[in-house]
Amino acid sequence: MGADTSGRGVIRRAVAGQRRDVVVGSLLGAAHQTGEALVPVLIGLIVDRAVVRPDGGALALWLVVLAVVYAMLSYGFRFGARAGERAAEQAAHRLRLDVVRRVLAPHGGAEAGRPPGALVNVATEDARRVGALNMALTLGIAAVVGVVAGAVLLLRASVPLGLLVLVGAPVLMALGHYLARPLEHRSEAEQERAAHASGVAADLVAGVRVLKGLRAERAAVARYRATSQASRDANVRAARAAALQTGLMLTLTGAFIALVALVGGRLVLSGSIGLGALVSAVGLALFLPGPIAVLAWVGAELAKARASAARIADVLAAPGETTGGTVEPSAPGGAAARTASGPDTPASATTGPDTPTTAATPTPGELRLHRLGHGGLHGIDLTVPAGEHLGIVVTDTADAATLLRCLARRCDPDQGRIELDGTPLTELAPAALRSTLLVAEHDAQLFDGTLLDNVTAAAPAGADPHPAMAAAAVDEVAATLPGGTTGRIGERGSSLSGGQRQRVALARALAADRSVLVVHDPTTAVDAATEARIATGIRRARTGRTTVLVTSSPALLAATDRVVLIDGGTVAAEAPHEDLVRDHPVYRSAVLT
């Protein structure tokens, strides 16, 4: 992705990236337009040399020449349009990839303030409009050549007619650009409204079960109706602006062509040009509205593309939720070990020949929170040794959400720091951090596809997903699907119950096999018997790996090595689950009521 993420930069990259096809399409289109301009000239020559003075041989010769010109303009249009369309589609495709990469970028931030539907609209319709500028540019360059060719041929027939076209065509083009300005603003408003309507629709579809449960269908329909009507009104205003621009341009073009015909007729009556020249002039006068109208259309397409490019640029230039971070955590020794010894230091330089291997390559995954302060959290000090199975109970759900955001590095703490194997998260490259530490949130989304595809979405290549599926009791879910693990679960897991979706999401997190796994309330919709089985399964699947369960589930907490209670934004207590249940009333209230 280029450094220039302005609207002009988006358009510049979209065109420059397809310059080969644009150039080829423009040249072939120019050949087509030149051929179109030559046709009336050749017909005029045939009239002068083979009709006014009958000559069968000359007639046959000029008819062959006319056929060759027709073949040239036909193939020029066919292959030129193909090149232009290919440039448009490839540019739109690359823009879609740019938008998706930005949305999925490890530092995040592109989705802030934008509903999913709005981002989909940017990645589809806006990308299509900017990509279509390549086709418009191809046709526009060809149209300019056509106007110039027509003017030159008119100059050969009559200097006054040629000068009239050379002066009038640029004036028409300038008027077209001026008339397209209102369309650009209304097109931008139209796309904004359409994106908002798409976002509202996506929200309603995602929450349809909740809406039905609350019997809020009427309110939801009323909300979408108002949004859709606003989008329709913006679309109508944009269509009116486009119709006005097109109508005015057609009127001006028609008046211009009438003026050319009038001047040509007076020249014929005065004897300045002959019958063949008159035929050529009339034919060229009929030809010129085509390329001039194309130029007006190009102006409208440019206005739409500029509005869409500005929206794409807003997404591409959106500030990240976090910044910085370049260190890559090492697999066996952890980030701290790599920092101490350096990436190029031989093992013998730090361990010696007789040092046991286990001392040289400690298990990675130590997590430390040092005086962490952010939002409602204050002075959190917590060390999670590598391989520990830790439970965290947070009495305030907002504090739990803040803790998860900091651990996932979706935000950086206001005070203190979080370290992974001795290296602050702010120094780790975001992509490398996510390959080591995974925060599986409570509302994790599933994707349309098979059960197995969802479980293995983040799993290492060639890894066996079945232990993770067994640990999360997904084998029971597979038994209810036609086709078992290869059965489709629908968009967002729509064919599954809430508890089944939670189990699939948990299996996906376990199958990812990260050194550090943080899971938030993975079993809130699961029955007690299954929850107890999952608690044992997580412990078994994560043996030797750091696991943090942010939950208030007694079954999950009972399977942990230690539980930390965060109350009022600070660490209030830490001990095994049974001890806290017996000795701490706040903890007892949080997990048993």
Image (cartoon, helix red, strand yellow):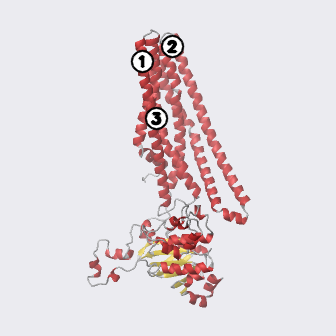
**What is the number of the mark on residue 267?**
2
Q: Which residue is depicted at the point 67% across and 64% down?
A: 209
Where is 105 relative to 67, above or below?
Answer: below
Drawn side of residue 522 relative to residue 225, left or right: left
Between discs 1 and 2, the one toward the N terminus: 1
Kind of element beneath mark 1: helix
Where is 247 relative to 321, above or below?
Answer: above
Q: Which residue is mark 3?
A: 78
Picture coordinates of residue 371 (x, y %)? Answer: 49, 78
- Quarter-of-image position of residue 501: bottom right
Q: Nearer the viewer, residue 127 or 423?
A: 127
Where is 417 relative to 121, above or below?
Answer: below
Between discs 3 and 1, the one toward the N terminus: 1
Question: In the image, which is nearer the foreground, mark 1 or mark 2?
Answer: 1
Drawn side of residue 532 relative to residue 341, left or right: right
| Label 2 crowd (10 A; few <14 / some 14-19 / many >=20) | some
Q: Amino acid at mark 2?
A: Leu
Q: Is residue 407 visible?
A: no
Q: Which residue is depicted at the point 54% across and 66% down?
A: 451
Q: Is residue 179 visible?
A: yes
**What is the number of the mark on residue 62?**
1
Q: Amino acid at mark 1?
A: Trp
